[in-house]
Structure formats: C-alpha cells, structure tokens
C-alpha cells in the first residue's frame, strides 16, 4: 500500500515539475531550480509563481476531487461506469454555478450554488431511477445520462439569454478550463479534508461494495453511509466545477484503471485516486496549453478524447 502511494506521489511530483517547465516559454531544469531558490530571470519568476504554479495546483486539485468522487459513486452503485459527469452531477453543479455567476454573486456563493445544483442532480437521478421499485445499475446509468442531457439543455438556454460580453468566458469555462484558477488552495483543502474524512469509512465502503444487504447483515449502517457518499460526492463535484468548469470522465478513467492495478481495497483506492486523478489532469492541462502553443485548448477537450473511448470500452465489457 505504502509503496504504491509513494510511486503515485513521485509521479504526481514529476507531472507538476513538467507542467511548471513546459509552455509557450520553456523553463529549463536549471532555470526552474534557480527560480525555486529565489533567483532566475524576472520573466521566469513571473511565469512560475504567478501563472503556472496556481494553474497546476488547481488542475491537480480538480483532478483529485473528480477521481475521488467517481470512486465513491462506483462503490455506491457497484458499477464501474458511474461518474459525476455521466450521472449528471457535473451538469447540475454547472447550472448552479452559472446561475450564481449571472446573478453577480461572489465566489463563496457560486460554490454554494454549485453544491446545491449537484445535490439536486443527485436527488433527481436516484429518485427517478428508483421510481416505485428498486433501481438497477443500468437503469440508474440511463437515468443519469438523460438528466445530464436535460442539464445540457438548461445550460444552452442560459447561454442564449446571457449578455454577449459574458459569453466567451462562460463558454470556455464550461468546456473545462483552469487558466482562470488563481486561488488553488480552497480545492486543495477540500481534497485533503475529504480524504481524511473518508479513510475511516474505507472498511465499511469495502463491505458496501458487496451489496447493501450484505453490508447491513455485517452491521454497517447502510443508509447513513449512502447519504454520506451522496453529500460528499456532490461537494467534491461542486468544488471541482467551481474551480475549473465541467470536466468529464476523470472520475470514470482513474478509479477503474487503479482497480485493475491495485485491487478494490478502498483504503488504497481513495488516496490513490486523489494522486492519480490530480496527475492525469495536470498532464492533460500541460498538453492542452502546449500542443498548439501559444494558443490553448480547454482541458475538458483532452479528458473527453481520453474518456469517451474508455467509456465505450467499459460499456461493451459490461455486456
């Protein structure tokens, strides 16, 4: 366990250093070391401390938040296709955040509105999928896809009535963009606190993954645990959406790949998701801002190009 997490930690550090060095202006390794020591040119110092470091930390936090949220949803649903983006949580959070933006609210209220939207999406998906009987993973997945499409229609309507001068920034944000994330510390703190909160529940989550009846028979308080997962996954998704917009498939790819390598013990998977999800999004953001430099792509485009084939592959395997 410790060895795996150490390897992921080293990979995360390497990805962060790569992101700090690469861009439209490349900072060589010695130049990067000089800046870290308080020396180096003024241009390199500005690039590193004012632009690249906040963006890289924000990307890392966002990726970790989405990956942990995806892992929690997959345990709850016992379905590797579960993901905040696919189930409509990201869409609900985006609608809530956009409403707060249009109303001219501050950052804290935007985050609260995004959380309310994600919780509303969760209630809608699980309520509609449950109906008068019990939900099945396939029924829940289909309901999530339909609700996500509904959120997309609401977002389109909101954009249609938005003043033209606000449209470019909102559109780019919706596609997933960390270039405007200047305060990465709130999402990093939320990510760290969520891991601290969820690790004591890891044993119960391992039992819940076998099914609610088995978990109840073994003494697990199933309903409070499920509501904890609902609320925590919504909070993580809302924080990620507030930080970097709607970024898809990170919560789908990372937990699934880690389970193939590390097994299904949540004591390992959850902290590993925080590190691997952050690493993936840092690398994706580095690629997004270097592939056609000096122009930049939304990082959501890169994750979608990775996530769509993975989703189709998992959907085919689930047959």
Image: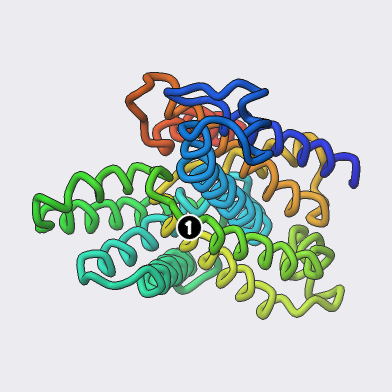
Instruction: Tell me the quarter of the picture where residue 316 sits.
Output: top right
Crowd tier of the residue under label 1, counting other residues whose Cα lies within 10 Å: few below 14, some 14–19, many 20 or above:
few
66 or 313: nearer the viewer: 66
Give SS at disc 1: loop
253 or 174: nearer the viewer: 174
Q: Whole-percent x and y of residue 36?
A: 65, 39
Instruction: Tell me the quarter of the picture where residue 206 sits.
Output: bottom right
- Examine the rendering and report whether any part of residue 128 can be seen: no
- Examine the rendering and report whether any part of residue 75 can be seen: yes
Answer above or below: position of 43 versus 161: above
Q: Whole-percent x and y of residue 240?
A: 49, 56
Q: Whole-percent x and y of residue 239?
A: 49, 62
Q: Residue at x 55, y 39 (%)?
A: 281
Image side of residue 292 versus residue 54, left or right: left
Q: Residue at x 43, y 45 (%)?
A: 178
Q: Whole-percent x and y of residue 133?
A: 51, 70
Answer above or below: position of 218 versus 291: below
Image side of residue 83 versus residue 167, left or right: right
Image quarter (top left, top right, bottom left or bottom right) of the C terminus: top right
Q: Residue at x 77, y 59 (%)?
A: 210
Which residue position holds label 1? Answer: 183
246 or 168: nearer the viewer: 168
Answer above or below: position of 116 versus 308: below
Display coloring: rainbow
User: Looking at the image, how many numbered discs can be counted on the residues?
Assistant: 1
Image side of residue 221 versus residue 147, left or right: right
Q: Residue at x 20, y 44 (%)?
A: 168
């Amino acid at each position: 366990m410790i060895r795996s997490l150490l390897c992921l930690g080293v990979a995360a550090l390497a990805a962060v250093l790569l992101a700090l060095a690469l861009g439209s202006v490349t900072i060589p390794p010695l130049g990067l070391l000089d800046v870290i020591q308080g020396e180096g040119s003024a241009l390199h110092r500005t690039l590193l401390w004012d632009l690249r470091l906040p963006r890289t930390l924000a990307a890392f936090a966002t990726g970790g938040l989405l990956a942990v949220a995806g892992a929690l949803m997959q345990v709850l649903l016992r379905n590797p296709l579960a993901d905040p983006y696919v189930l409509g949580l990201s869409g609900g959070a985006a609608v809530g955040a956009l409403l707060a933006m249009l109303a001219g609210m501050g950052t804290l209220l935007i985050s609260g509105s995004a959380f309310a939207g994600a919780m509303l999406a969760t209630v809608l998906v699980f309520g509609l999928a449950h109906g008068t009987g019990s939900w099945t993973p396939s029924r829940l997945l289909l309901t999530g896809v339909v609700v996500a499409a509904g959120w997309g229609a609401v977002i389109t309507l909101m954009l249609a009535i938005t003043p033209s001068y606000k449209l470019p920034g909102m559109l780019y944000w919706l596609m997933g963009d960390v270039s405007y994330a200047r305060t990465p510390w709130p999402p990093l703190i939320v990510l760290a606190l969520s891991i601290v909160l969820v690790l004591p529940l890891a044993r119960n989550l391992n039992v819940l993954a076998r099914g609610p009846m088995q978990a109840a028979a073994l003494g697990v308080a199933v309903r409070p645990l499920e509501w904890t997962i609902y609320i925590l996954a919504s909070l993580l998704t809302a924080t990620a959406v507030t930080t970097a917009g709607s970024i898809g498939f990170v919560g789908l790819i990372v937990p699934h790949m880690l389970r193939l390598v590390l097994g299904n013990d949540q004591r390992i998977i959850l902290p590993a998701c925080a590190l691997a999800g952050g690493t993936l999004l840092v690398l994706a953001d580095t690629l997004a801002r270097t592939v056609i430099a000096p122009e930049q792509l939304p990082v959501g485009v890169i994750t979608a190009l990775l996530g769509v084939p993975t989703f189709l592959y998992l959907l085919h395997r689930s047959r």
